[in-house]
Image (cartoon, helix red, strand yellow):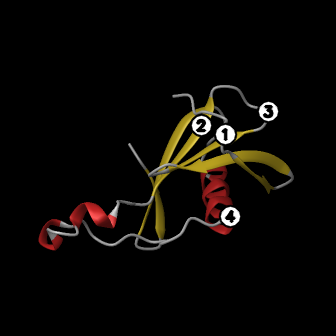
Amino acid sequence: MAISKKGLRSIVVNEDIFFWKFNKKVFVIPNEANNSLLIVDFGWYDVWDYANNAAQRPPDFEPRTVTPKFVSTSILYALNNGWKKGTFEIEFKKGNYRLKG
């Protein structure tokens, strides 16, 4: 899965440069690795989609705002769990990370 470079933000983790963006999930690509993508799913949804039907709203998600600290922590988790090349997907729920899939 390729992501558009438009709107990417840079972040440095362990002296390596990564680029990231948020679009319902957090997408991260390393500066130097081709065909490498990290996807972080933290359960985000648009609360306005459930404005008229709160009973069917999914569970709340955290963090409420994607911050560079959250992105950095997610990258470190992925790297420590084997992310080097290819697509790597992780999930963040109730304050804990887990490998997805």
Residue at the image position 63 percent from the left and 67 percent from the top: 67
User: For this rendering, which residue is in front, 46 or 28?
Assistant: 46
Residue at the image position 32 percent from the left and 67 percent from the top: 47
Q: Secondary structure at mark 1?
A: strand
Specify the label residue 8 is tagged with.
none
Please report whichever mark, 4 or 1, sits nearer to the chain's N-terminal start. Answer: 1
Cα–Cα gap, marks 2 and 1:
5 Å
Query: Do the residues bearing badges 3 and 1 touch, measured as CB atoms within 8 Å?
Result: no
Give the percent coordinates (x, y) of residue 72: 68, 60
Residue type at mark 4 is Pro
Specify the label residue 68 is tagged with.
4
The quadrant of the image that shows the C terminus is top left
Cα–Cα gap, marks 4 and 2:
17 Å
Count how many numbered circles sit on residues in the image: 4
Please report whichever mark, 2 or 1, sits nearer to the chain's N-terminal start. Answer: 1
Please report whichever mark, 3 or 2, sits nearer to the chain's N-terminal start. Answer: 3
Cα–Cα gap, marks 4 and 3:
20 Å
Which residue bears the numbered disc 3? 32
Q: Nearer the viewer, mark 4 or mark 3?
A: 4
